[in-house]
Amino acid sequence: MKDKHITIIGGSGGMGQVFSKYFKNHEFQVTIYARDKTKLKKVAKDLGVTFSTSIEESVKNADLVLISVPITSTIDVIKRVTPYLKEDTLLFDITSLKSEICEIYKQELRKYPINCLSIHPMFGPGITNMKNYTMLSLEVGGTKNYDILVRELLELFESDGLIIVETTPDIHDTKIALTLGLPHMVNILFLNLLRRSNEPLNEITRFTGTTFLLQKVFAESIIQREMEMFAEIQMENPKFLDIIEDLQSLINEYKKIIENRDKKKFYELFTNALEYSKNDVHFENSYEYFYEFMRILKTKNEKNQ
């Protein structure tokens, strides 16, 4: 795929910059487009790539077009650019929801001789090495050259150690509600519950054990990222409401167990969680992983003192 031209819409954002660097390093001709012209020009200069202030002009000669914009803007961008794409262009996105996106792709494919793919990199903009990270892939369809073009792109990712997992829109959105929406929610609620104690976090941390400290680090690392992304992943995914309802039910059940000092029910709930966890391939080494994280954290703290 060397020397091919890729346009990245939303190229000045966090993930847009990740993929701009990535494709430039693989000798693609990279053009980025974004609405904020000042930031666009600065990022293009910093990355050493071309920029365009016209979304239509930016995609006309592209072999590949990557859409890296918020979930709520992705459909509008797809509809806006497809009339300007040349034949056989591979159009793909990295949005965190797929059911509606894939349906829009199918509609556009009835009108234009292009190719559509939806991917979801399971990492954030802080990544420096993609090796052993997961990339979810949802093939949609396109021209007679579809299989060749998609395979070239996915093999490029695989050559850098990315693990490609093929899935479907419904399965994707269900799993993402569990693997992204749920941990985001738990950590946002964790910090807000601490805030409601009216105790300064530094003061609470003085009394901390290993479990609390690690949970706090996870929560603080999450809360520093883009609020809009977290809101969209939870609010735009209808599957996530089911998780909230299950959580409410579980909390009510837990409250009754604690109020009634029902050790039998507590043991049952605890044992159910334990047995479920035992099926996980990481289960046996989880305690070892826990203390390895703690060792790293302790070493970092000692260096900063």
Image (cartoon, rainbow, N blue to C red):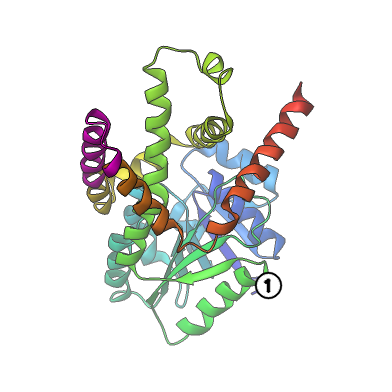
Q: Is residue 34 above or below residue 102?
A: above
Magenta highlight range: 245-264
Is 260 positioned to the left or the right of 137 in the image?
A: left
Q: Nearer the viewer, residue 51 or 236?
A: 236
* Residue name at image x 49 percent, y 63 percent: 65
Residue 132 at what x, y percent from top left? 62, 62
Is 103 positioned to the left or the right of 119 in the image?
A: left
Is 178 positioned to the left or the right of 66 in the image?
A: left
Q: Is residue 120 above or below residue 250?
A: below
Q: Main secondary structure of the magenta part?
A: helix
Residue annotated with mark 1: 2
Residue 198 at what x, y percent from top left? 41, 12
Q: Is residue 113 magenta?
A: no
Under mark 1, the amino acid is: Lys
Q: Nearer the viewer, residue 177 or 105?
A: 177
Residue 193 at what x, y percent from top left? 37, 24
Give the quarter of the figure containing the C terminus.
top right
Is 116 positioned to the left or the right of 256 in the image?
A: right
Residue 34 at what x, y percent from top left? 49, 45
Q: Nearer the viewer, residue 136 or 219?
A: 219
